[in-house]
Image (cartoon, rainbow, N blue to C red):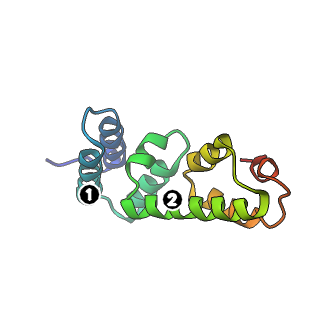
Amino acid sequence: MKIPKERVVWLGEEALKRLTDSPLTEQQKFLLTECVEAYLPLDETQRLDFDRILHDVGNEKVKAMNKTTFEKGIETGIQNVLLDLGSKRFGPPINDIERRIQAIQDVKKLQALTVRILDAQSWDDLLKTS
């Protein structure tokens, strides 16, 4: 099937959005997402557009579905380090604090919190901007 050049990026985005709402398992969604990305005929400019769309605000479902096990492991590792460092500095976190940290699934935000822990005075102070 020949896809018009001006529709390729839209078609890829539409395929990923439909996958997020499908009744498939997370593993099946991930594998099909990998197929879409691998076989979508994108040139360099289209690849940049497609990547920008994937990272735009509002595509959280697509971003979450597209995370690899490795990326999820990195997030979990940083969350654990943050909880360990915070426990040493402020004492054990209450359940709400632990839940809030585990809800952060952006590596850059987690890294920023890990640095902020050096200046924060409490768990609440650490998380006040998150």
Question: What amino acid is at disc 1?
Answer: Pro
Residue 40 or 95: which is nearer the viewer?
95
Above or below, 110 against 130 in this view is below
Image position, residue 38 (x, y; %) = 26, 60
Question: What amino acid is at disc 2?
Answer: Thr
Q: CA distance from mark 2 to mark 1?
A: 34 Å
Residue 76, disc:
2
Image position, residue 85 (x, y; %) = 69, 65
Residue 119 or 51: which is nearer the viewer?
119
Check disc 1 and report the residue beneath it.
Answer: 41
Q: Could you tell me which residue is drawn at 33 percent across and 32 percent down?
A: 21
Q: Residues within 10 Å of mark 1 (few under 14, many from 20)?
A: some
Above or below, 22 against 42 in this view is above
Above or below, 117 against 29 in this view is below
Q: Residues within 10 Å of mark 2 (few under 14, many from 20)?
A: some
Spot the residue most to the front: 92
Whether the residues at callouts 2 and 1 have beta carbons within 8 Å, the answer is: no
As helix, strand or loop, the secondary structure at mark 2 comes to: helix
* Figure label count: 2
Would you identify the image quadrant in which residue 43 lies?
A: bottom left
As helix, strand or loop, the secondary structure at mark 1 comes to: loop
Residue 49 or 93: which is nearer the viewer?
93
Q: Could you tell me which residue is drawn at 31 percent across and 48 percent down?
A: 8
Q: Could you tell me which residue is drawn at 45 percent across and 50 percent down?
A: 54
